[in-house]
Structures are given as C-alpha cells and as structure tokens.
C-alpha cells in the first residue's frame, strides 16, 4: 500500500492579545485625530487698560438762514461785502433794471466818509498781505469788495424812492451776508435721513456784481443768530452711549477747538440712528461750509482689559443674600439646606461665582434645583423661613485658569468696542490684574483641565 501524504496547513490563530492591540491602535488614531482637529486653547493675561472710543464723523451743518431774492429781472449791484454784517432793514443789494448804472462804481463821487475810507484800506491791505499768484480769484474778490463800498456811497445819493432807477432789497433781520446758495438754507433737521447724509453733494451758485439775474432768483443768504446745528450719522455704539444724555464734548478739527455742546440722538424715518449737535459759538468760522469734520470725545473709562472672544454667558442659580452667613474670622460664606435623609439642617460652603447687593450666584453642582435653603441667624440657629432654589440668571464672564482648570468668573463690563471690553476690577469673585483667562472661550467648558 502506497504511502499516504498528509498535507499540513499552517495558520495563525487570532487571540485576545491581538484584539487588545487593535482596540488600542484604533483608540490612538481617534485620539490623535481629535487632538489635531481641536482648536488650540489660547490663554491671555489680564492687564489694566482703556479703550479709544472717540469717533470722527462728517456732519451736515444747518443754520438759521434767510434767502433774499431778486424782485425783478435786472443787473445785480451788491452793497454789502460777503462775510460782512448787515443791520435789520439795511440794504443788501439793488437791481439795476436797465443796466445803465451797473458800471457806475462811485467814481464820480467826491466825498466818502471816514468809515468808508477805512473799509477800502482794510480790503486793499488784506489783499496785499494775502495775495498769491496761485489764488488769482482773490483779485475778483477784491474788486467785488471795493465795488460794494463804492456802491454804498452811491446809494446815499441816489436814494431808493419811487423814482429811483434801482430796486433796493433790504434784509428783514440783522446777520452776516453770503452770496453763495447751495439749496440747504431752508432744510430742517427732521427732513434729513441718514441715507441723505451719506449722499450729500453741495454745489454753490454764487452771484457777482454786474451779473444779470431773473425775477425770483436767489441772490444771497443772511445768517442770523449764533446757534447752529450739525447732523451726524452715528454708530450703534455711540447711539447707546448718548441715549438719554443731553451734553457731549466735541472737537472741531478745522479750528482746533473742543466744545461742550448739547446733543440729541434719535432715529430717522427709516429707523436709522442720527445725532443732532447744537452749538452756540464759531458760527461765522463755518459760514461758508455745509459739511464739517467733527469728533465725539467720550470720557475714557479704565479698568481690566479683556478680549471680546474671552467673554461667555452662563446661567447661574440665585440665592437671596440673607440666606448666606459668614462666621467670624472666616472668608467663606456658609449656607444651610434641608437634608434629604432626616430633614435636618446641613451646613455647606459652596464656591460662589458672584454676588451683588441682592443675590449670591452659584453654578450647577454647587446646588441643585429644588434644594431648600434654610435661614439661620448670626449664631447659626435655624429659622422658619426657607428658600427653594429654582431661578437662574444669565451673567457674562470669562474662564479663569489660574488653577489649571477652567473656572467661570463673572465680569462687570463698563466699556466695550468691537474687539475689547473694559471690566471693573477689584470686585469680589471677579478678576484681578495678571489673572490668566481663556482667550478663545468657545473652545472650553466649565472645569475643563488645561494643564
């Protein structure tokens, strides 16, 4: 009988050791993946500081202005130099109906008063001192100024009766005369929206001596009174700050002046935020301007400076302050609650997150909803009154990591901008200078171990 060949199949048997190594390997892969994908926890150091809260705006100027128009067609003769004051019922300009007298600049007159002579000298001296070849327009301004003085002499001799060849126009109020018109002279504050403020483009039409004008055409404006207004398209932050306030400090960069002014913030017809600044000085300094650069200077608040990314909200249980008791020579606050075992009173000293004049604020775990807190007198004797824990309040705070793990600390924010907050320092249960807090608070949770 032939020998039989037996085929031996060798193999490796899977055992528990292999399974353990496989589980550990998979766990390590998952752990590494989580570590790599997790956002790095960044820690910041609390320092003292303040915020720059001053905002610069371009505002629209509104004034008390009246417009004088031509009663009929003709040629303009200005008797008041631009920027000079006119008395009530004083003659501002005249209309030369035929143009026959427009070139009469008073050269035929033999006598002028001392005041008129001084006015002529003033304009010529100012021109001599300030003239530059790059500003040739000053020559035309001088011509208009001199003509206005000479025309005023002519007016006295011609008179303005029924037979006068000139139609004289007087001002109905005293003020300062300007011969430029931009269309905003009669606009009121409540007619302006924030959208208007973004799109304002002013174009002046200016009248000069000898120009032919139409009947009803605006010739000049008279600014009367010292009060004027500026409308600003303010930020939400400034609106919140000045809401309910009546005073503000503003800085006028063009004249390098800080002023205490009245302020009113309101919403326009579209619900957009506007501030109205009322000023009673320097109206003549901006008489030729319709737009102004203005800065709102708010008082600087100092405290502890933290990044906004550090701020989180937390819901905390509240306990009325009369239920906490601090024994002599102790820094801890003791509470008493009814025991679930024998209904007796048990003392405990929880970690308090915050306290104000009314409540202590505690986190979940320190107390539970439904706990009955008992009232005790100064000697620790239990009274009849009790408080059932149920209410929570949401407070803002940061995660303090001085101990190596995240502890929620309530902060009292006294100022803020888009990036940082200023919080009150020196408060119980709050922050102190050089505390370490989580910069990116959304990456951690309460009691997370950091190191």
Image (tube, grey):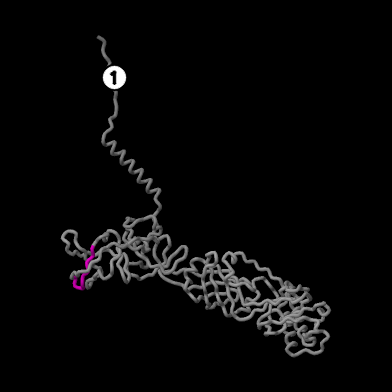
Residue linked to disc 1: 7
Residue 146 percent location from the top left of the image: 76, 81
- Residue ID at (73%, 79%): 127
Query: Residue at the front extreme?
Result: 162
Residue at image x 43%, y 65%? 421
Residue 372 drawn at (x, y percent) = 23, 63
Q: In the rendered structure, which segment of residues is drawn in magenta?
A: 372-380
Q: Quadrant of residue 386?
A: bottom left
- Which quadrant of the view contains residue 397? bottom left
Residue 139 seen by the camera: no
Residue 167 location (% of width, % of height): 77, 80
Hey, which quadrant is residue 445 in on the image? bottom left
Residue lying at the far left in this picture: please name it.
Answer: 342
From this viewpoint, which residue is outermost toward the top?
A: 1
Q: Is residue 157 left or right of residue 35?
A: right
Density class for disc 1 (Cα within 10 Å; few <14, some 14-19, many ≥20) is few
């Amino acid at each position: 009988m032939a020998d039989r060949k037996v085929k031996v199949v060798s193999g490796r048997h899977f055992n528990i050791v292999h399974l353990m190594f496989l589980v550990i390997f998979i766990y390590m892969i998952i752990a590494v993946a989580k570590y790599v994908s997790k956002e790095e926890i960044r820690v910041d150091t609390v320092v003292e500081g303040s915020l720059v809260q001053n905002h610069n705006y371009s505002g629209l100027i509104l004034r008390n202005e009246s417009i004088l128009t031509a009663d009929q067609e003709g040629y303009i003769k200005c008797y008041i130099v631009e920027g000079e004051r006119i008395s009530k019922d004083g003659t501002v300009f005249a209309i030369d109906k035929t143009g026959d007298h427009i070139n009469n600049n008073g050269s035929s007159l033999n006598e002028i008063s001392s005041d008129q002579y001084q006015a002529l000298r003033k304009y010529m001296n100012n021109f001599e001192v300030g003239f530059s070849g790059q500003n040739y327009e000053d020559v035309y301004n001088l011509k208009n100024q001199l003509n206005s003085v000479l025309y005023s002499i002519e007016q006295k001799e011609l008179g303005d009766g029924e037979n006068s060849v000139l139609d004289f126009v007087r001002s109905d109020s005293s003020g300062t005369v300007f011969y430029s018109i931009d269309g905003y002279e009669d606009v009121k504050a409540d007619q302006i929206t924030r959208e208007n403020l973004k799109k304002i483009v002013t174009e002046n039409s200016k009248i000069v001596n000898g120009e032919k004008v139409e009947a009803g055409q605006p010739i000049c404006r008279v600014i009367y009174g010292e009060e004027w207004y500026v409308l600003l398209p303010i930020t939400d932050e400034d609106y919140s700050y000045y809401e309910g306030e009546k005073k503000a400090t503003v800085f006028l960069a063009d004249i390098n002046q800080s002023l205490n002014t009245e302020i009113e913030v309101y919403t326009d017809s579209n619900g957009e935020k506007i501030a109205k600044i009322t000023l009673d000085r320097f109206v003549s300094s901006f008489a030729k301007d319709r737009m102004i650069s203005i800065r709102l200077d708010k008082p600087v608040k100092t405290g502890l400076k933290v990044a906004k990314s550090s701020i989180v909200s937390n819901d905390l249980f509240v306990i009325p302050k009369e239920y906490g008791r601090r024994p002599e020579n102790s820094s801890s606050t003791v509470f008493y609650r009814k025991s679930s075992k024998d209904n007796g009173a048990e003392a405990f000293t929880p970690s308090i997150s915050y306290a104000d004049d009314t409540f202590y604020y505690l986190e979940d775990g320190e107390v539970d909803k439904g706990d009955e807190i008992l009232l005790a007198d100064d000697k620790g004797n239990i009274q009849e009154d009790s408080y059932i824990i149920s209410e929570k309040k949401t407070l803002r705070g940061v995660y303090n990591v001085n101990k190596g793990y995240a502890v929620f600390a309530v902060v009292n924010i006294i100022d803020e901008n888009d990036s940082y907050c200023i919080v009150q320092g020196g408060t119980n249960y709050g922050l102190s200078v050089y505390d370490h807090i989580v910069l990116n608070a959304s990456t951690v949770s309460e009691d997370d171990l950091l190191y």
